[in-house]
Amino acid sequence: MEDGQPERQLNIHMDPQHLAGVYANFANITFSDYEFTLTFARIDHEVEEGDVPGVVVARVNMSQQFAGELLVALQEAHSKYTTVKGIQDLPETDDR
């Protein structure tokens, strides 16, 4: 941020029907010269024969620049998660 610029905060509105979010256990990523498309689906892995059924729960189109920024943010969040999870999984020590 440049000097003299007031600090700005995001003010993002969310419609009530989106508050719960959606569950996805599959993602497909496609791209063109102009954008990346992330398609999220919920797949039923319990089906043992034939096609595996699934339903798309969200599709997001984004610019190449935003896709790169999202990738960096996901990597940072995953690194923080693995650090915290690693600390939580350390064995307890008995200092007696």
Image (cartoon, grey):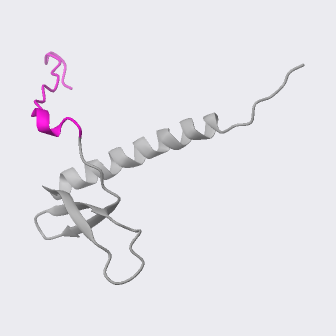
Q: Disc count in the image?
A: 0
- Residue 88 at what x, y percent from top left? 62, 34
Q: Quadrant of residue 11?
A: top left
Residue at (41, 43) in percent of width and height: 76
Image quadrant containing the C terminus: top right
Image quadrant containing the N terminus: top left
Give the magenta range: 1-20
- Residue 57 at what x, y percent from top left? 20, 56
The single residue placed furthest to the right in the displayed view is: 96
> In the picture provided, is 69 more to the left or to the right than 25?
left
- Residue 81 at what x, y percent from top left? 49, 40
User: With respect to residue 90, does 74 lie above or below?
Assistant: below
User: With respect to residue 12, does 40 lie above or below?
Assistant: below
> In the picture provided, is 53 more to the left or to the right than 6?
right
Q: Quadrant of residue 24?
A: bottom left
Q: Nearer the viewer, residue 45 or 93?
A: 45
Q: Nearer the viewer, residue 16 or 69?
A: 16
Residue at (32, 75) in percent of width and height: 52
Residue at (41, 48) in percent of width and height: 75
Residue at (24, 47) in percent of width and height: 22
Q: Is residue 79 visible?
A: yes
> In the picture provided, is 63 more to the left or to the right than 86?
left
Q: Would you say residue 68 sits in the magenta stretch?
A: no
User: With respect to residue 12, does 75 lie above or below?
Assistant: below
- Residue 40 at what x, y percent from top left? 25, 59
> In the picture provided, is 10 more to the left or to the right than 80?
left
User: With respect to residue 52, does 23 lie above or below?
Assistant: above
Q: Is residue 38 visible?
A: no
Q: Nearer the viewer, residue 16 or 29?
A: 16
